[in-house]
Amino acid sequence: MKKRLVMIGNGMAGIRCMEEILKHDCDSYEITIFGDEPHPNYNRIMLSHVLQGKTNMQDIIMNEYSWYEENEITLYTNERVQSINREEKIIITEKNRTLTYDKLIIATGSSAFILPVEGSTLPGVTGFRTIEDTQFMIDTAKEKKKAVVIGGGLLGLEAARGLIDLGMDVHVVHLMPNLMEQQLDTKAASLLREDLEAQGMNFLMEKKTVKILGTNHVEGIQFEDGEVVDCDLIVMAVGIRPNTQIAKDAGLIVNRGIVVNDYMLTNDESIYAVGECAEHDGIAYGLVAPLYEQGAILAKHITNLQTDGYSGSIVGTQLKVAGCDLFSAGQIYEDDQTKAISIFNECKRSYKKVLIRDNKVVGIVLYGDTADGTRLFSMLKKEEDIQEYTPASILHKAGEESELDVATMSADDTICGCNGVTKGTIVHAILEQELTTFEEVKGCTKAAGSCGKCRPLVEQVLSHTLGDAFDASAQSAGMCGCTTLSRDEVVAAIHEKGLKSPKEVRNVLGFAHEDGCSKCRPALNYYLRMAIPEEYEDDKSSRFVNERMNGNIQHDGTFSVIPRMYGGVTTADDLMKIAEVAKKYDVPLVKITGASRIGLYGVKKQDLPNVWADLHMTSGYAYSKSLRNVKSCVGSRFCRFGTKDSLGLGMLLEQSLEMVDTPHKMKMGVTGCPRNCAEVLTKDFGVVCVENGYQLYIGGNGGTEVREADFVMIVPTEDDVLRIATAYMQYYRETGIYGERTAYWTERLGFDHIKEILQDANMVTKLNERFQTARGTYKEAWGQALETKSLKAMYEVETVK
């Protein structure tokens, strides 16, 4: 007869422990799980990615309801267990459900700590721990514009970044002088703050909150020094509090957490505790890796397998905010016994600091370049003697390459810190399960299944283990988490099956989520309009906010207005209109842009239609995935070195190719001579005018990863330039992955292949024809918004009286 195993809690630590139990013994226990949230187990780590718009709620579900059914687990969601009767071995829920147990696991996790100040219970105050918290923040951002995040630690900064991405003006309030003071030293914290400020984050340091203002809703926050900041939303990210009350009421020993021994047993031999609610050797851990280690020990003990017991964990910290890479572990400051080796590369904003005591690594702080994190963390955990290393290179052996080589890693080195997956575990799974792709490895081992930052390492292990059998081309996953189908398969199905709408695509092709996700919605909108331009009507709601609003949103919620100036050319009349509009609407910044245009920055949302109407100019599409501009020098019109009319050609290209959507933004350039004043070799399509014609270049990029454009051909006339540019743009439209710049597209398809397409006169003609068909369906964005009542209504702002 099966014993009854009951688990209180349905979160990451508890369910991971249950997965381990089932792996060791799936027959001995009748399992029941209670969760107080109305969801199956989900990845709490990824809530910040949901808030930042990188994924959706459905994508972070780790164990679907079907998993519980397949493993014969009885799950009660949205039902809190209220008490434990240890003498009779019975639990009682808030719905008066009673259940007996032979073994009980308490995995109740923790709750956000809410500051006990006046006003903390007002509507508009929230923690950041659950799906409901996250959805509340997303919904609030649709109507409100000012947010305060209390807490400059890991969670607070991730929440602040997400709220900025949702269009809110965000202030981060922190009690200490440095951000993340538990993980970063003063230098790294300063670099982090500078980078986050550049992203639009505002900071109020060394501020103690004493009161939250408002009557029926949050209206502001007051600090000890008397300063008041207006806000509509307050997010508390000042720490967590282990959920221990049920254990305390049952008479279990509780300090900060529920006290457990090395096998995660409480002072009752029938009751275990695991996760954030548990306290081992005086420590209650809040990061997922040690909680998974605890779960693995518990699972072996409860299934009567030999195990060494849990001896504590050394944890590393990473931040999940775009553009800010950091890694920290162990001690962060020097003392009498601890010395530091540090390097700061000001040009690359890279800071590396390793703390040494008795020839062993005891602390790591990395900012900007975190590639050494895994290797150094391994040294720290193993207490490796570092005397043979070269300190000047931040602990590389003499002659050793800076890039981490998984071949040199031992089997017990950690690849995935979030889920505690070692190199040995991955290698064993690859060999035993005959895994060949990253997705298979992730599904089998959970490696890279949380924050995903270790994916490159996982792929390196896969490549190293398979050797010649590794197929890099097979590593591409589906176009999003809703489907395993690739971009090419989806587009082919649109043509073959005559699919006409995103909903039809998702239904016919069996997407997992009926409404799609934040990744596939804009992609399908693009692919459909590209594939059937005369039949498909653009779905504005599927576009990103900048494209919906026809302007780039700024960090304060205002917008930029950048009118089209073909080839960078303007007139006295247009300049006068710009000046008049800037004065009339009190525009705070008027600037010459890097694309040789004039931008108006800080325009209020409600003023956008009137600004466009008063300018009486067309949109420069500076916000869109389309041709942004054609940068041109004056050429032979004025320059004594100019060989051709580069300015006229640039204007012709821009006028002929504007408005039409592409997988990502495109930039072009025309220079009047090889001196290259228009910098065309870092453009998606570049033209160098020479005496005997026009040299054409493709696939350049001047962004974060600079790529020099490849020379493709020389043509004799301007008409030839336009034909090739049009064919190139259309072929990119038809074969590019949504969100892929031409630099990556050129390397993915192969330069020689694209060159062959552009040298095929018949193909160039067909591509030109298809482009003209598509272009005929586009209307100028600002004009269309002014003429269309439903579009114009988007810019109206309700006035609260």
Image (tube, grey):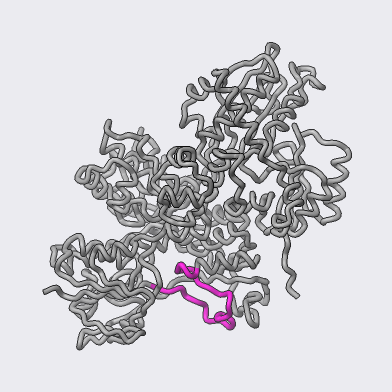
- Say if the magenta span includes residue 200: no
Q: Nearer the viewer, residue 568 or 483?
A: 483
Residue at left 49%, top 38%? 495
Q: Nearer the viewer, residue 728 or 253?
A: 728
Extreme-top residue of the structure: 692
Q: Could you say where residue 158 lies in the image, as x and y percent from the top left?
A: 51, 60
Q: Main secondary structure of the magenta part?
A: loop
Q: Quadrant of residue 11?
A: bottom left
Q: For this view, does 186 lie left or right of residue 317?
A: right
Q: Could you say where residue 445 lies in the image, as x and y percent from the top left?
A: 28, 52
In which quadrant is the N terminus drawn? Answer: bottom left
Residue 273 appears in view: no
Against 93, residue 564 (above or below) is: above
In which quadrant is the C terminus drawn? Answer: bottom right
Q: Could you say where residue 791 lies in the image, as x and y percent from the top left?
A: 70, 55
Q: Quadrant of residue 275?
A: bottom left
Residue at left 26%, top 73%? 32
Against 207, residue 666 (above or below) is: above
Residue 561 appears in view: yes
Q: Could you say where residue 622 lies in the image, as x and y percent from the top left?
A: 68, 43
Q: For this view, does 756 lie left or right of residue 104?
A: right
Q: Nearer the viewer, residue 523 or 339?
A: 523
The residue segment tinted magenta is 110-133
Counting the numbered discs, the total is: 0
Against 589, residue 698 (above or below) is: above
Q: For this view, does 86 lie left or right of residue 139?
A: left
Q: Quadrant of residue 572?
A: top right
Extreme-left residue of the structure: 1
Against 636, residue 206 (above or below) is: below
Q: Nearer the viewer, residue 185 or 24?
A: 24
- Say if the magenta span includes residue 124: yes
